[in-house]
Image (cartoon, rainbow, N blue to C red):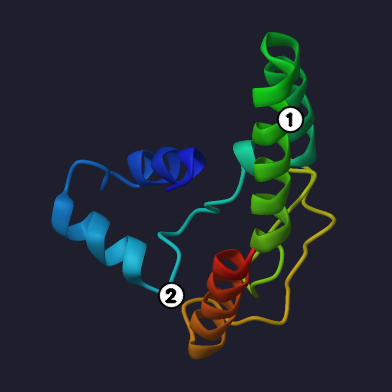
Amino acid sequence: MDLDHLLTYYRAGILFNFRKLLMATTSKDNVGMPQRNFFHNIFFFLLASTIALAINFSAGLVFSLAYLCHLVLDSLDNSNYFPFYPNLKINLRGPIKYFSQQEFIFTLVLLIIFLII
């Protein structure tokens, strides 16, 4: 789960309500607030990557690549994604519908590629 999702669930008052939290995490609907905000922007990615690389270059490189892949994959679904948050002028919405058969097939293809590699 993404850290900024936890902030959104806390602000919505459902973080410590297991039933509502489960409903929110498995629903196609947002909880009334953007769930991709502070930790899903390019600026935080650069900051976190720089810190990780300074602490341990090898581990920081793995962290940075994983984080970048996460941001790229998040930009592929049709949910709102603002890469320069809090600037909301650029909104990336990809072709894959969120929590759909398309997403499950895409995930399966990625899993097969991962297993082959």
Residue 113 in which image quadrant: bottom right
In the rendered image, the vertical position of residue 49 relative to residue 104, given as above or below: above
In the rendered image, the vertical position of residue 56 relative to residue 85, given as above or below: above
Residue flagged by tag 2: what amino acid is it?
Lys
Dot 1 alpha-carbon crowd within 10 angstroms: few under 14, some 14 to 19, many 20 or more? some
80 horizontally vs 16: left or right:
right
What residue is shown at x 43% (from left), y 75% (from top)?
A: 28
Element at label 2: loop
Reading the image, the residue beneath label 2 is 28
What residue is shown at x 49% (from left), y 81% (from top)?
A: 104
What residue is shown at x 60% (from left), y 71% (from top)?
A: 110
Reading the image, the residue beneath label 1 is 61
Residue nearest the observer in this picture, 84 or 114:
114
Direction right: furthest residue: 89
In the rendered image, the vertical position of residue 100 relative to residue 46, given as above or below: below
CA gap, disc 1 and disc 2: 33 Å
Residue 24 in which image quadrant: bottom left
Residue flagged by tag 1: what amino acid is it?
Leu
Q: Position of residue 15 (x, y in %)?
A: 27, 43
Q: Position of residue 99 (x, y in %)?
A: 46, 78
